[in-house]
């Protein structure tokens, strides 16, 4: 590839649009000082993405724009375009011709264009690097830069040699790999820190997860056992309830006809009592008899009172009595005892006998007491009292007679009544028996009701226990029919009592668990669940998230470790490649440099040798050994490259002792050695031959001609000898503050 054309518009002193066509070989740009010929070099440098305004002899972006003159105003923007013929190997875009352009306005904003399409600076620089147009800082050599080569430090000159070796691509890769290596180490450290933080958290979450899994296991077992146990209890309660309901139904069925029968018997008995008239007659006789008995009792009371008064009167004259007081007391006591009986309920005959006996005793007493009465004290009173007593006794005897007459009549009627009552008693016996049966049925009904209340308590406890276990519902229990475990009752003795379920010989046909064992297992599993405690179901999701993150980071750590190893291997490989290219290029450049040096100076010797101080090597080795003791390469120990010169017939102690011409010729030899090795498409030389005399200029031109076979040269010079050997010549002049061009193709002259 080669540069076909350069277009300038508004760039520095080139106010008008100006084009420079470049043939193969050497193009010379000449002109007086201040004409603007170096602005052509600045335009090329700027178009090749130069970012340092100091290298463009400016301070701001608008300094690159035509400022104006007396006859022409300033411009708003400047642009430079370079046209390349892409006929070589380095053609990244695949076009036969490529135009790169750069524009700037007064705001300082730059625009980069590739074939008229606006691109980023990164893409622009990438094209320049791939096409080898702008991959070196020594593509444009000024007079000061050529002299600067000899003033480079060994380390800086090493960079110059590395650039000549074309290892910039490897160094960029190494730099990028080193950055990635650094970032990878940092990321690995971060991942390691996170993993350290996650490990205890993951351990805690795993424990919680294991607990939750145990809880789920316990819960499953508990649900199965609870379904079996509560299902069994539920069926027992249902069976007992059905039995009680059946019993109540049977009792109710028996009660109704029995109650009807008892009612009929009661009505029959009562109606029988009401039908007979003997009851009323007996009632009248009984009433009359009670009246007579009442009258008789009243007379008896009066008789006793009269006797008491008589006794009182006789007491007064007791000294006249023919008997002792104790005898009288005994008699009166006997009389009182005879009369101190309950007359109520006595038949007439017995009452008459009692009254007759009392009358005889009273007459005997009166006969005994009659002789001893004192007429002076009260003889009239006692006879009167006795006379009244006699009348009372007479009336009482009459009443007794009536009572005796009534007794046979009452007995007759009672006999008739008793006959009727025998019939009634037979019915009453049946009535009593039926009442007993009714009582037993009612007791049985009450017991059934008590059993029903007991059943309700069992049902309440069943609901309470089921709620306490809390893993099954009644609907689940009703619908649960295990295939492998069928609970059956082994004894009918406990039927109708759910409490017997836990103590009976109820067993599972497959698991062989008694109901008691089932209940014990249910509550044991319930306690285990409570011991596990309440664990949020989100803990599994949290564990899975943390575990997934931990596994991801672990894998990431492994990947980063592998990446780290790969990057370290890549860096080492790049270092080896750089070292190999560097050493090869250094040896080749030293050889070519020595040849050009002998050609220019007509003899002598020039070499490029690696240089390093012992202190530098020691420091580098110690630092490298501390960081990576296994990877200390030879080129890392070398601090730089030094130039060794031996002029013909002259001993050179150091480069600083060379004259100006010798320094220029030596730097030209170095530059030509670089061009010979790298073979850049284009090189721009800005007055590097200014210090050469005619003879040395001829040597310079001869070397330039030889190198122009592979490299296109654009030379800015005042030297006529250089102009004479140019393939094309441009003259630059200044008029009214604007640079103008005059072109001449010397190949046709």
Image (cartoon, rainbow, N blue to C red):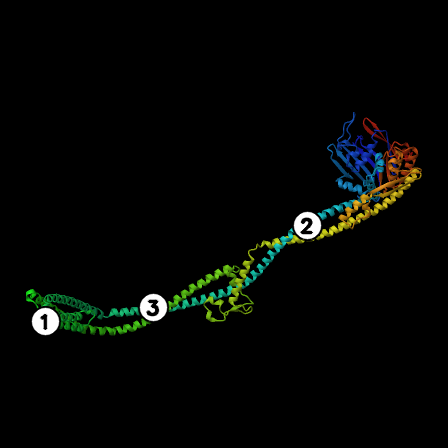
Q: Sequence order check: which comes first, mark 2 or mark 3?
A: 2
Q: Residues within 10 Å of mark 3 (few under 14, many from 20)?
A: few
Any mark on residue 191, and which? 2
* Foreground residue among 408 and 376: 376
Q: Is residue 119 visible?
A: no
Q: Is residue 328 left or right of residue 504?
A: left
The residues tagged by marks 2 and 3 sit, at their Cα atoms, a distance apart of 97 Å
**Disc 3 marks which residue?**
260
Position of the N terminus by quadrant:
top right
Q: Quadrant of residue 263?
A: bottom left
> Percent x, y for residue 362?
13, 71
Q: Sequence order check: which comes first, mark 2 or mark 1?
A: 2
Q: Residues within 10 Å of mark 1 (few under 14, many from 20)?
A: few
As helix, strand or loop, the secondary structure at mark 2 comes to helix
As helix, strand or loop, the secondary structure at mark 3 comes to helix
The residues tagged by marks 2 and 1 sit, at their Cα atoms, a distance apart of 149 Å
Please state which of the two labelled residues, at mark 1 or mark 3, is closer to the viewer.
1
Please state which of the two labelled residues, at mark 2 or mark 1, is closer to the viewer.
1
Labels in figure, total:
3
Q: Is residue 156 visible?
A: yes
Q: Is residue 76 left or right of residue 276?
A: right
Q: Do tag 2 and tag 3 residues touch (Cβ < 8 Å)?
A: no
**Disc 1 marks which residue?**
322
180 shown above or below 666: below
> Percent x, y for residue 359?
13, 71
The residue shown at (69%, 53%) is 555
Q: Sequence order check: which comes first, mark 1 or mark 3?
A: 3
Position of the C terminus by quadrant:
top right
């Amino acid at each position: 590839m080669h540069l076909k054309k350069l277009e300038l518009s508004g760039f520095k002193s080139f106010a008008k649009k100006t084009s420079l066509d470049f043939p193969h070989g050497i193009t010379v740009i000449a002109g007086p000082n201040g004409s603007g010929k170096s602005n052509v070099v600045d335009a090329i440098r700027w178009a090749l993405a130069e970012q340092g305004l100091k290298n463009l002899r400016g301070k701001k972006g608008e300094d690159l724009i035509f400022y104006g003159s007396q006859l022409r105003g300033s411009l708003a923007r400047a642009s430079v375009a370079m046209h390349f013929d892409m006929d070589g190997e380095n053609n990244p875009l695949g076009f036969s011709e490529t135009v790169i352009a750069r524009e700037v306005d007064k705001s300082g904003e730059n625009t980069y264009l590739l074939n008229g399409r606006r691109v980023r600076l990164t893409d622009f620089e990438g094209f320049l690097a791939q096409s080898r147009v702008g991959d070196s800082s020594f593509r444009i050599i000024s007079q000061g830069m050529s002299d600067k080569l000899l003033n480079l430090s060994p380390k800086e000159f090493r960079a110059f040699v590395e650039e000549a070796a074309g290892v910039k691509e490897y160094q960029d890769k190494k730099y990028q790999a080193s950055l990635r290596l650094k970032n990878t180490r940092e990321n690995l450290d971060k991942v390691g820190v996170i993993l350290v933080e996650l490990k205890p958290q993951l351990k805690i979450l795993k424990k919680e997860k294991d607990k939750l899994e145990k809880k789920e296991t316990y819960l499953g077992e508990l649900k199965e056992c609870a379904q079996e146990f509560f299902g069994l209890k539920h069926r027992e309660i249902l069976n007992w309830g059905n039995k009680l309901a059946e019993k109540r139904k049977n009792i109710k069925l028996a009660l109704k006809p029995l109650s009807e029968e008892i009612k009929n018997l009661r009505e029959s008995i009562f109606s029988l009592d009401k039908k007979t008239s003997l009851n009323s007659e007996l009632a009248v006789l009984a009433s009359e008899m009670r009246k007579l008995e009442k009258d008789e009792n009243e007379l008896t009371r009066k008789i006793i009172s009269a006797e008491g008064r008589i006794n009182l009167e006789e007491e007064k004259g007791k000294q006249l009595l023919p008997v002792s007081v104790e005898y009288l007391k005994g008699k009166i006591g006997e009389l009182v005892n005879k009369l101190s009986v309950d007359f109520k309920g006595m038949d007439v005959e017995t009452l008459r006998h009692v009254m007759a006996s009392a009358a005889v005793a009273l007459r005997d007493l009166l006969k005994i007491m009659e002789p001893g009465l004192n007429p002076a004290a009260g003889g009239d009173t006692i006879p009167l009292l006795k006379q009244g007593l006699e009348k009372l006794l007479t009336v009482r005897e009459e009443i007794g007679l009536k009572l005796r007459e009534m007794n046979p009549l009452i007995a007759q009627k009672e006999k008739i009544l008793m006959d009727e009552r025998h019939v009634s008693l037979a019915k009453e016996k049946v009535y009593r028996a039926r009442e007993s049966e009714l009582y037993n049925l009612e007791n049985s009904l009450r017991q059934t009701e008590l059993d029903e209340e007991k059943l309700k308590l069992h049902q309440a406890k069943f609901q309470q226990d089921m709620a306490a276990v809390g893993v099954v519902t009644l609907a689940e229990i009703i619908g649960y029919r295990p295939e492998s475990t069928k609970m059956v009752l082994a004894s009918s003795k406990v039927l109708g009592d759910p409490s017997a379920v836990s103590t009976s010989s109820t067993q599972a046909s497959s698991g062989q668990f008694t109901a008691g064992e089932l209940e014990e297992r249910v509550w044991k599993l319930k306690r285990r669940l409570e011991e596990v405690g309440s664990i949020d179901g989100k803990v599994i999701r949290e564990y899975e998230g943390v575990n997934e993150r931990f596994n991801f980071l672990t894998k990431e750590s492994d990947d980063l470790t592998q990446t780290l190893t790969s990057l370290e291997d890549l860096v080492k490989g790049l270092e080896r490649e750089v070292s190999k290219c560097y050493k090869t290029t250094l040896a080749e450049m030293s050889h070519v440099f020595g040849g050009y040096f002998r050609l220019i100076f007509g003899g002598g010797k020039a070499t490029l040798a690696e240089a390093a101080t012992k202190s530098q090597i020691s420091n580098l080795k110690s630092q490298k050994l501390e960081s990576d003791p296994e990877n200390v390469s030879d080129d890392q120990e070398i601090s730089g490259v030094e130039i060794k010169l031996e002029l013909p017939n002259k001993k050179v102690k150091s480069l600083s002792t060379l004259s100006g011409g010798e320094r220029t010729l030596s730097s030209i030899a170095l530059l030509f050695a670089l061009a010979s090795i790298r073979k850049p498409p284009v090189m721009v030389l800005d007055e590097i031959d200014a210090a050469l005399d005619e003879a040395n200029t001829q040597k310079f031109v001869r070397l330039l001609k030889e190198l122009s076979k592979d490299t296109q040269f654009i030379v800015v010079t005042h030297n006529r000898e250089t102009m004479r050997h140019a393939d094309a010549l441009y003259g630059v002049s200044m008029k009214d503050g604007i640079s103008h061009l005059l072109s001449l193709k010397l190949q046709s002259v």
